[in-house]
Amino acid sequence: MNIASEMNTEEVLRLKLEVLKREHRDLDEAIRALEEKGGVADQFTVRRLKKQKLTLKDRIAALEDQLTPDIIA
């Protein structure tokens, strides 16, 4: 059997969440390095990486919503 079938849904979601957060941090570091370097070509790359970072942020928020139950007060 594969690992995913042995893990429950919440564990899989938490693992995906950690991977996405790591990717988000990596993109942040790459953006910071490119911004320090400068250059026209780098500006386009920075813009593309920022869009990817926003997409990851949305995916992270969606997973966190799945993992956190709604509490009606």
Image (cartoon, rainbow, N blue to C red):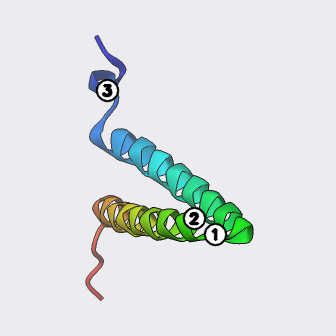
Q: Which tag, 3 or 1, sits closer to the chain's start?
A: 3
Q: Position of residue 36 (x, y in %)?
A: 73, 69
Q: Amino acid at mark 1?
A: Gly
Camera-side mark, 3 or 1: 1
Q: Give the quadrant of residue 60.
A: bottom left
The dot on residue 14 is none
The answer for how far apart the CA atoms under marks 1 and 2 are is: 5 Å
Q: Nearer the viewer, residue 57 or 52?
A: 52
Q: Secondary structure at mark 2?
A: helix
Question: On the image, numbered disc 2 is attached to which residue?
Answer: 42
Residue 22 placement, left or right of 66: right
Question: Which residue carries the number 3 mark?
Answer: 4
Tell me the quadrant of the picture where the N terminus can be found: top left
User: Residue at the location (70% across, 62% down)?
Assistant: 33
Q: Amino acid at mark 3?
A: Ala
Of labels 3 and 2, the one closer to you: 2
Q: Rate crowding at label 1 as few (under 14), some (14 to 19) or many (20 or more) other CA atoms within 10 Å.
A: few
Specify few, some or many for label 3: CA neighbours under 10 Å numbering under 14, 14-19, or 20 or more: few
The location of residue 24, given as percent across then percent down, is: 52, 58
Pointer 3 or 2: first along the chain? 3
Figure check: 22 above or below 56: above
- Find the distance from the CA under tag 3 to the CA under tag 2: 38 Å
Which image quarter holds the C terminus?
bottom left
The residue to which callout 1 is attached is 39
What kind of residue is marked 2?
Asp
- In the rendered structure, the answer to whether residue 15 lies left or right of residue 28 reads left
| Mark 2 residue crowding within 10 angstroms, few (<14) / some (14–19) / many (20+) | some
